[in-house]
Image (cartoon, helix red, strand yellow):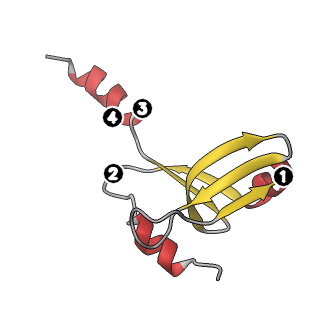
Amino acid sequence: MTSPALWEIYRVVSMPLLVTYRGRPIKRRIKVPSGLKLLFYHPQPFIPGDVLEVTEAEWREHGEIRFLTPDQMPDLWALAARTRWF
């Protein structure tokens, strides 16, 4: 059995990330020569989302990475439906 201090470290390290670009949730970020390729969540599960390539400067200006506790994490598909660009 682990000590409470070790469990607390594991809980903090395993906090989920909410990664967004202009408010839209991102499923995956891929480094490409021109910057980053962003794969977004689709409002419905198991359907590929939109893909957007951005420069590093655009990512620094509009991208956001937040550490949240599991109970703070929003429903990513619902968030994708609310922030859909087109």
Dot placed on the residue nearer the N-terminal end, 1 or 2:
1
Q: Quadrant of the C terminus?
A: bottom right
The reply to whether discs 3 and 2 touch (Cβ–Cβ < 8 Å) is no
- The crowding category of the residue bearing disc 3, from other C-alpha atoms within 10 Å (few below 14, some 14 to 19, many at least 20), is few
Give the amino acid at mark 1: Thr
In the rendered structure, the answer to whether residue 38 lies left or right of residue 28 reads right
Residue designated by label 3: 13
Q: Quadrant of the N terminus?
A: top left
In the picture, the disc for residue 70 is: 2
In the picture, the disc for residue 11 is: 4
Callout 4: helix, strand or loop? helix
Does residue 34 sit above or below 22 in this rendering? above
Q: How far is disc 4 from disc 3 in space, using C-alphas?
A: 6 Å
User: For residue 33, which quarter of the picture?
Assistant: top right
Q: Residue at x 68, y 68 (%)?
A: 22
Q: How far is disc 2 from disc 4 in space, using C-alphas?
A: 10 Å
Nearer-the-camera pick, 53 or 8 = 53
Q: How far is disc 3 from disc 2 in space, using C-alphas?
A: 12 Å
Give the amino acid at mark 4: Arg
Q: How far is disc 3 from disc 1 in space, using C-alphas?
A: 29 Å
x and y, in percent, of residue 46 in the image:
40, 62
Q: Nearer the viewer, mark 1 or mark 4?
A: 1
Callout 2: helix, strand or loop? loop
Give the amino acid at mark 2: Pro
x and y, in percent, of residue 47 in the image:
46, 65
Dot placed on the residue nearer the N-terminal end, 3 or 1:
3
